[in-house]
Amino acid sequence: MREYLAGDRGEAELTALQERYVQDVRFCLGLLLKGTPQTTAIQMIKEELSVSYAKAWRLVRETEEIFGPQGEVDKRFQRYTASEMAKEAFTIALDSKDAKAMVAATNAFSKAWGLDREDPELPDFSKLDAPANILVIPDEVAEKLQALPSGGAINLTDFLKSIAEDVEPEGEPARSAESGDRPAAQKG
């Protein structure tokens, strides 16, 4: 069906059931393009096409999945139109050197794009803290870290060497001729 609606498939290739579905989707799309609210569109689809509420609801969802949410398209078009009108008003005000009209056009443009409102979804950045990094380390290492002096410069070279001395090596990883210098996967 998507191939047909995208224009990649001819109408002669559709079954009778698929043709009915295409007609239903087109009817639903027509309602949504007119700006009919979804609840009203579902009721109209239910009555006009003699289908259940669930079928009408699915048809609206599938139509929006195929063609995108039509309410958002209309809103974006209105925003674009309002901003273009504000740009034109600004150009006229600029030509006539009318500062008040330029400010009014700028305000209209800002309102069209929602620049005059704060985004309610944004958090208060001044109250945000950096996330805590929780480290899980062996008890022996924790004891050695606590034994370090609390002030001044700390030479971590000796500290890291002392930790390395406590670690018992498990042996060199097996090398594979295919992988060159990379270790082969160890079996456990």
Image (cartoon, helix red, strand yellow):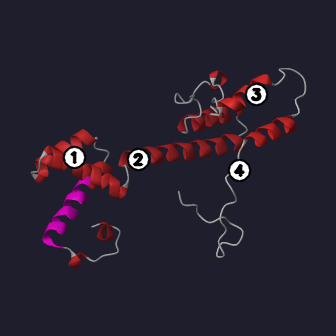
Q: Disc 1 marks which residue?
A: 57
Q: Are the residues at dot 4 and dot 3 in contact (C-beta closer than 8 Å)?
A: no
Across and down, in percent, residue 160 comes to 80, 39
Q: Quadrant of residue 35?
A: top left
Q: Disc 2 marks which residue?
A: 74
Counting residues from the start of the chain, the first of labels 4 and 3 encountered is 3
Location of residue 142 with respect to 113 vertically, above or below: above
Which label lies toward us, 2 or 4? 4
Counting residues from the start of the chain, the first of labels 3 and 1 encountered is 1
Q: Secondary structure at mark 4?
A: loop
Which label lies toward us, 2 or 3? 3
Which label lies toward us, 1 or 2? 1
Counting residues from the start of the chain, the first of labels 2 and 4 encountered is 2
Residue ID at (23%, 45%): 41
Q: CA distance from mark 4 to mark 1?
A: 64 Å
Across and down, in percent, residue 129 comes to 65, 25
Across and down, in percent, residue 115 comes to 59, 34
Q: Nearer the viewer, residue 59 or 80?
A: 59
Counting residues from the start of the chain, the first of labels 2 and 3 encountered is 2
Q: Quadrant of the N terminus?
A: bottom left
Q: Disc 3 marks which residue?
A: 145
| Amino acid carrying mark 4 in the image | Pro
Q: Are the residues at dot 4 and dot 1 in contact (C-beta closer than 8 Å)?
A: no
Q: CA distance from mark 2 to mark 4?
A: 67 Å
Q: Disc 4 marks which residue?
A: 169
Location of residue 15 with respect to 90 vertically, above or below: below
Q: Quadrant of residue 37?
A: top left
Which label lies toward us, 4 or 1? 4
| Disc 4 packing (10 Å; few <14; some 14–19; many ≥20) | few
Q: Nearer the viewer, residue 175 or 54?
A: 175
